[in-house]
Image (cartoon, coloured by chain):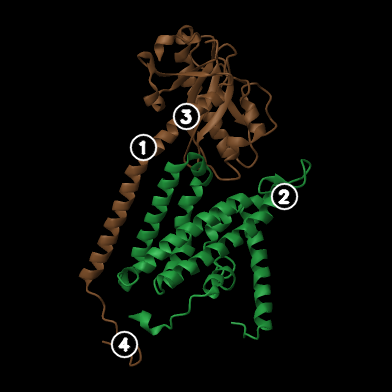
Amino acid sequence: MANDLRKTKPLDWDTFKEGVWKENPVFVMLLGLCPALAVSNTAINALAMGLASTFVLLGSSTLISLLRNVIPKQVRIAAYIIIIATFVTVVDYTIHAISLELYNALGAFIQLIVVNCMILGRAEAYGSKNKVMHTLVNSLGMGVGFTIALLSIGAVREVLGFGSIFGVSLFGADFQPWAVFILPPGGFFVLSLWLVLFAALKRRSDLRGGVHAA
Amino acid sequence: MSDSAQTPAVPMPSSGRLIATLAIIAMLSGLAVVLVYQGTLEPIARNRREALERAVFTVLPGATVRVNFLLDDTGLHAVSDEAVDQANVYAGYDAQGNLVGLALPGSARGYADMIRVLYGYAPDQESIIGFTVLQSNETPGLGDKIENDPAFLANFDGLSARLNEQGSALAHDMVTVKRGAKTQPWEIDGITGATVSAVAVGRALRESANALLPKIVPHLDRLSRLEKEEY
């Protein structure tokens, strides 16, 4: 089996941090950009989407990691898609049953998570090849990284587009909102600016650490 | 078949194994979804009923008692609370038993899926006195402003819903106009950036009022006082 050929990396702080910084799903791996742009028009939406995606990523990756020796390689993508879609559906119905208020606030986001390629990509690249504890910790890191990325985009878009942060008005009633930032083009602008910043920071830290730029 | 000396060739599992694995995963997933669906059907329906009951008091300020009615071609029939979501007219009475207004449902296709609304109609003022969104999947931050934008909600504090002389339809159809362009009492000031959602709300109210109000007018005498036997 392919698993035997990889060295089992130790489970440590790096397993978690990987997803936040070095392999940040949005800024480094450019995964999950579609929901990232769509629901990051305010900070609170970004936070809700980030948390919901983290929960689905955690659950489905762990499940796939548990089943990694059972699912043959040739049908793994189809199997993972079924598992992820089922997981999201179960979460959707459960939230709907628990609290209608929470569902109305989050409902649209939950269904969007199915198309977040971070979930499938991570399950395939990591969950299918690593042990359960590693997968759990790494997925947690990925989810945190995703949430941080979304929050950075969402905060900028909300401040410029609505003049508020988390619903708290910053500039008072006379503020002229820069409406383009709450619409899709604004999402692209803000995302690209963050990407440039992130890449510059990463390059500087790589050079300082003496690591050759990839 | 393996020509590489370094990596040991992994024999491909039989097609039977592949098909079996996928089939089992698919069946278990289907089972999980169906179980969760059945398990949550009752709690979700109960939540919706409770939200509907609360919404009636939201759109009829001052009402403390609610009576459900089903208005159809055979007349006006009182409906119990178990079937509250089958009713289409909710009468709200104040503490003295006087009719505050009638809460009526409406729906229209918005930007994403159907928008379901509930609005309060006061027969003595012939206008809409309250409004709330029961269900919407509109875009967060844009379309969902129909639910809580103060300027938009202010539209429904006295929106004219007068019937024509024959009582067969609205005298003036309510319509959503651009934000700031409202000149008539039956117009609804829209929301910039959420035109489709705001227009859908206008359409929902217009279609519901045209369908229900002419049929309710003959029953207004019966509805105007709270009758204890009805519930």
Question: Which label lies toward us, 4 or 1?
Answer: 1
Q: Is mark 4 on a helix, strand or loop?
A: loop
* Amino acid on which the number 2 mark rests in the picture: Trp
Q: Is mark 2 on a helix, strand or loop?
A: loop
Question: Which label lies toward us, 2 or 3?
Answer: 3
Q: Position of residue A157 (x, y in %)?
A: 67, 54
Residue underneath mark 1? B42
Can residue A183 be seen in this snapshot?
no
* Disc 3: host chain: B
Q: Give whichever of discs 4 and 1 has the lower sequence position.
A: 4
Residue underneath mark 3? B52
Q: Do labels 4 and 3 share a chain?
A: yes
Chain identifier, colour brown = B
Q: Do labels 2 and 3 share a chain?
A: no
Chain identifier, colour green = A
Q: Where is residue A31 in the image (x, y as percent from the top left)?
A: 52, 65
Point 59% across, 82% down: residue: A214
